[in-house]
Image: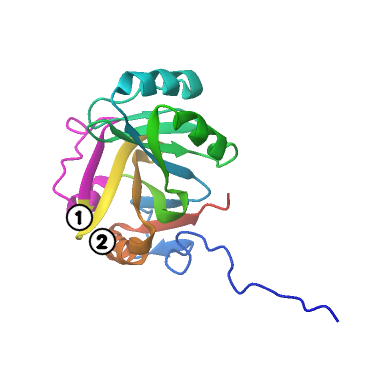
Amino acid sequence: MDKQETSIWRPRRPWAGFAEAGQIGESREPGITAVTLEGLGFATLIAGTSSEKLERATKRLLGLDLPREPCAALSDTHGLVWSGPDQWLLLARKRTGFSDLLVSLSVDAAVSEQSHGRSALRLSGKRVRDVLAKGSMVDVHQAAFPVGTAALTSFAHIGVQFWRTQDGPDGAAFEILIARSMAGSFWSWLAASAAEFGFCVTIDQA
């Protein structure tokens, strides 16, 4: 009789066990909305001796220029976020074809796949800046942090990379990226910090 082996390992969503759909805190209209971002692709790109070659490649393959300061260049399908001198975060809204894209970019850059090591979410709402101000000294006021601005900082001693996207119907919107191993600690801080404003959580089912 053939022996059938079944793996005990199963795929796990980045925020599984921490974020749950619903509202936390105040029952009035939520001042902050969080949407967990699932199924995204992430990679670190580090330019070689010349970043111009990499910029030509990203322009050709993605239609995006490499940001030369703390900013994010975003399209409907991809993004490039400045992460330091000659270093960028590449994001893909879907992982379909992501491996092939990384192979193409590896001709002109050192590429490190990060998709399974990161957790991401989108925060928006009328009180979103109040929550961000609790965790970091980065000034996220409209005048200091317009759409497209990015920052590397820490929230409650947890390393965070975040950028401002186009405003949504409920106000300013930010996308936040952290190490997946710190997702639980980050969520604990976020839920406690956002509760006083009314915190609505949606789980992306992508």
Q: What residue is shown at x 43% (from left), y 43% (from top)?
A: 42
As drawn, 162 above or below 54? below
Tell me the kind of residue under disc 2.
Answer: Ser
Residue 167 visible in image: no
Number of the label disc, if any, that sits on residue 99? none
Magenta stretch in the rendered image: 127-153
Give the residue number, with chain letter if any, for mark 2: 193
Q: In this rendering, which labeled residue sits more in front, label 1 or label 2? A: 1
Tell me the kind of residue under disc 1.
Answer: Gly
Give the residue number, with chain letter if any, for mark 1: 135
Q: What residue is shown at x 58% (from left), y 70% (from top)?
A: 9
As drawn, 157 above or below 149? below
Query: Looking at the image, which residue sits at the far right?
Result: 1
Q: Position of residue 156 (x, y in %)?
A: 20, 60
Q: Position of residue 136 (x, y in %)?
A: 17, 51
Q: Tell whether 168 sits left or right of 98.
A: left
Identify the element where label 1 is drawn. Answer: helix
As drawn, 5 above or below 193? below
Identify the element where label 2 is drawn. Answer: helix
Q: What residue is shown at x 51% (from left), y 51% (from top)?
A: 38
Q: Position of residue 105 (x, y in %)?
A: 45, 30
Q: What residue is shown at x 60% (from left), y 39% (from top)?
A: 96
Asked whether 134 falls inside the magenta stretch, the response is yes
Q: Position of residue 154 (x, y in %)?
A: 21, 53
Name the one closer to the observer, 196 or 139. 139
- Looking at the image, is mark 1 or mark 2 earlier in the sequence? 1
- Tell me, yes or no, whether the two marked residues, 1 and 2, touch with CB atoms within 8 Å: yes
